[in-house]
Image (cartoon, helix red, strand yellow):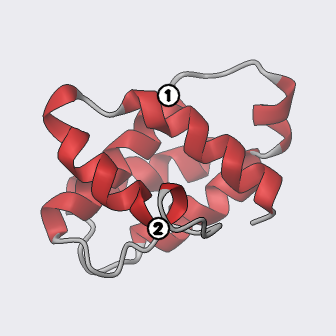
């Protein structure tokens, strides 16, 4: 994912965390915000944390953003969805929702 697309998606996702999920947002964004890396490290997330990240991504996708930038990066987002869907930590119901997004895109 290009840095521009990555930065855009991260910033669009950031406000979509619920208050009860802020602790996780801080953990996920730490390498990006504090350490200056251009990636997120999800390997150490628990199943719960991983699925919260997936939910936030679903929230982003469900906004049906008409922003041109979002539309031109939809394929990148779908690639990310496919990677998350096959992760062993992905809850089955979320995997089905991710699959439906992919099929409908």
Query: Which disc, if any, is residue 31?
Result: 2
Q: Residue at x 40, y 61 (%)?
A: 30
From the viewer's perspective, is 72 left or right of 27? Answer: right
Residue 60: percent from left, percent from top = 51, 33
Q: Residue at x 19, y 27 (%)?
A: 19
Numbered-mark total: 2
Report which quarter residue 17 is drawn in.
top left
**What residue occupies the far top of the structure in this picture?**
66
Chain-order first, disc 2 or disc 1: 2
The quarter of the rendered structure image containing the N terminus is: bottom right
Query: Which disc, if any, is residue 62?
Result: 1
Residue 16: percent from left, percent from top = 40, 29
Q: Residues within 10 Å of mark 1 (few under 14, many from 20)?
A: few
Q: Residue at x 27, y 63 (%)?
A: 50
Query: Which disc, if any, is residue 83?
Result: none
Residue 98: percent from left, percent from top = 44, 52
Report which quarter residue 69 is drawn in.
top right
| Element type at mark 2 | helix
Q: CA distance from mark 2 to mark 1?
A: 26 Å
Q: Residue at x 14, y 60 (%)?
A: 48
| Element type at mark 1 | helix
Relative to 20, is 90 above or below? below
Q: Nearer the viewer, mark 2 or mark 1?
A: 2
From the viewer's perspective, is 85 left or right of 67? Answer: left
Residue 96: percent from left, percent from top = 34, 54
Foreground pick, 46 / 29 = 29
């Amino acid at each position: 994912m290009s840095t521009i697309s990555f930065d855009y998606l991260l910033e669009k996702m950031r406000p979509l965390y619920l208050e009860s999920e802020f602790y996780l947002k801080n953990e996920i964004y730490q390498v990006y915000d504090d350490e200056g890396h251009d990636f997120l490290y999800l390997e150490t997330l628990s199943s719960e944390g991983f699925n919260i990240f997936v939910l936030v991504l679903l929230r982003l996708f469900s906004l049906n953003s008409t922003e041109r930038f979002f539309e031109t990066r939809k394929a990148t987002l779908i690639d990310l969805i496919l990677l998350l869907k096959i992760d062993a930590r992905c809850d089955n119901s979320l995997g089905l929702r991710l699959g439906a997004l992919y099929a409908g895109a």
